[in-house]
Amino acid sequence: MQYEIWHARYTRTMKLFVDTGDIDEIRRAAEWGILDGVTTNPTLIAKTGRGFRDTVLAICQAVPGGDISAEVVATDYEGMLREALEISGWNPQIVVKVPLIPPGVRLVRTLAEKGIRTNVTLVFSVSQALLAAKAGATYISNFVGRVDDASADGMEAVAESVEMVATYGYDAEILVASVRHPLHVVQAVQAGAHVATMPFKVMEMLFKHPLTDLGLQRFLDDWNAAGLTIFDRASG
């Protein structure tokens, strides 16, 4: 049993999502070939100045095959269900994002029974993650930055949630959200999280290391000083 838990935890691929509604940022991240999906929320959509549906469909087009989270805004079950059925019908890539509130957990169960994927958001504890997992969530968004802001360790709940879904065999994937800097991504890896979603600027920062810059400059300086070329000058 312990081997099976270890094997399930350590033989998968970590997904990287970008957390934005900015189409230009999404296209730039997609060009790198490492983007698995996009998460949005009402605040990010509002910043675009575009319509919700148009923005979400543009994101789907920018990341073919990627999972695109689009959030309901109603807070009552019936209202959330109407919105979820509408949103999920726009494109098969869409994952309905649902807040961790009682009507939301009920909605997740309903959508799971209909084969509609969900991303349960605003999760801050393993007990909340348990509710989402039992309801049939596809993704569980554990927030870390906001917990850190309250002088606590947001990654503790992530690690506990990863262990919880592995121990009990839930299909849910733990998604680390509210990522503020590259260290959060490193800690997500260390915790065995399934997904990390981050602002575009944080994803850009993952490329950066001073020794990479220094090493590249040294290689280029040596190459140019030697007068070397890859292409045969005679062949043009």
Image (tube, helix red, strand yellow):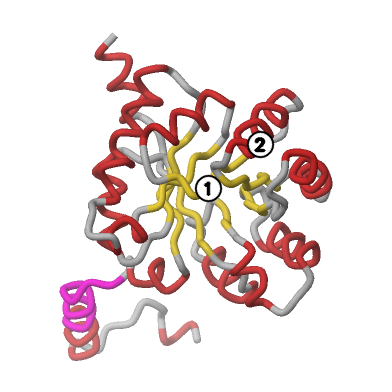
Amino acid type assigned to the residue bearing label 2 in the image: Arg
Element under disc 2: loop
Of residue 168 and residue 225, the one placed in the foreground of this image is 168
Label 2: few (<14), some or many (≥20) within 10 Å? Answer: many
Dividing the picture into quarters, in which one does residue 109 lie? top right
Q: Dividing the picture into quarters, in which one does residue 217 lie? A: bottom left
Tally of numbered tags? 2
CA gap, disc 2 and disc 1: 13 Å
Q: Is residue 204 above or below residue 236?
A: above
Mark seen at residue 78: none
**Quick check: 119 above or below 41?**
above
Q: What is the crowding at mark 1: few (fewer than 14 residues within 10 Å), some, or many (at least 20)?
A: many
On the image, the x and y values in percent for residue 140 come to 49, 40
Residue at 58% from the left image edge and 57% from the top image edge: 38
Residue 26 placement, left or right of 56? left
Q: Which mark is residue 121?
A: 1
- Find residue 117 and name its label: 2
Q: Which residues are magenta?
A: 208-218
